[in-house]
Amino acid sequence: MHDPMKILLAAPRGFCAGVAMAIDVVDILLDVLGDEPLYVYHEIVHNRHVVDRFRQRGVTFVERLADVPAGATVVFSAHGVSPAVRSEAAARGLTAIDATCPLVTKVHAEAIRYARNGFEILLVGHADHQEVIGTRGEAPQAIRVIESVEDARAVRVASPDRVVCLTQTTLSMDDAAAIIGVLQSRFPQMRQPPGEDICYATTNRQHAVRRLAPLAERVLVVGSATSSNSRRLVEIAETTGTPARLIDDAGALDVDWLDGAAAVLVTAGASAPEDLVHDVVRTLVRRFGAVVEQVIVDHESVDFNLPVSLRREMERRGRNPGTGRIRIDAPGALQRFADAEGLPVRTVPLTVDGSSPPAVTGGAR
Ligand code: SF4
């Protein structure tokens, strides 16, 4: 008789503070606008389910501001936009609500500051990602996008003593370190901003996968193919030697691939809703009789205020924006799910040696 499959649920996983804030912005606007149409420029966050759920509630997603009727309300997504987009929205008389994550805005501010001071900016990231397009738009004449170690080896700069390196917030820490290492060896005087650009949520989710994937025989990352940080989680799991797959939802589970695995690590990208994780857990429990253990690798307590543009719009319409603080609590949501399903879930901290953690700190009974 085999032991039942163990589901190791990584914590932290799923929504970060920026995603939670952006989703709340759209939620609140749907309520505030009533029957008025609401437009979102690009996917509000890179998750198919989030976007589809908003579409079903009447939100129109556009790839060009020209598709938003003059005078309508448009939300800029969590990934940020370039100044050209903000100007176009103003010129067309749109009410623009900016749901850009404050940690992306921080990188924009760094780009503006260094460009003003005459620096060449090497922006490490994916050239076609919305965040990089937006950041680059702050100072296109000063910014060069570096996508790879090869780019880092080939890039030429006019003044090696006036170079700074910025990064996309959702990169793999290992990939970014390799690229930045090459740039540093080529331009020893290159500056880096005092704070990390790769954000806390990306760092923590990658750290959890790096620690937990070796304890599992398969890794499932809940997230969409468009989500940069979700794809990085799959890559990181694979670098530890554990096969990993990205799945949008429980419908994409391949039970043959999971059959016989003693332990499966389940995590989720920063834009993946927690209820999709619960669906995956439920399916694995029913199919394999799996037992669930949530492993806390890091604690997160970051949250953001509602954007000023939304608060102003609410006040203009006589609505009280309240404290506007958005909180996320995946472990708490898991406990409510487990209680509702009558599912035993142990929640344990990761031990120093990364093996079979002993202490139970919560979770459903
Ligand atoms: S992944 Fe990081 S930068 Fe992106 S929205 Fe979340 S907190 Fe902000």
Image (cartoon, helix red, strand yellow):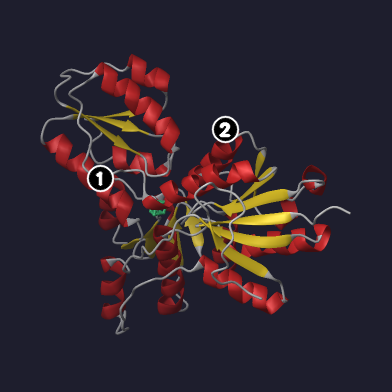
User: 150 or 315: which is nearer to us?
Assistant: 150
Quadrant hosting residue 25: bottom left
Give the percent coordinates (x, y) of residue 346: 63, 66
Quadrant location of the N terminus? bottom right
Q: Secondary structure at mark 1?
A: loop
Quadrant hosting residue 94: bottom left
Residue 47 visible in rendering: yes
Q: Which residue is mark 2?
A: 239
Give the percent coordinates (x, y) of residue 330: 52, 66
Number of other residues with Cα within 10 Å of mark 2, as a class: few under 14, some 14 to 19, many 20 or more: some
User: 330 or 135: which is nearer to us?
Assistant: 330
In terms of sequence position, does the residue under pointer 1 or pointer 2 come before the other?
A: 1
Q: Give the residue type at disc 2.
A: Thr
Position of 230 with respect to 149 (left or right) is: right
User: 351 or 88: which is nearer to us?
Assistant: 351
Q: Which residue is mark 1?
A: 195
Q: Give the residue type at disc 1.
A: Gly
The CA span between labels 1 and 2 is 27 Å
**In the image, is the residue at mark 1 within 8 Å of ligand 1 by its beta carbon?**
no
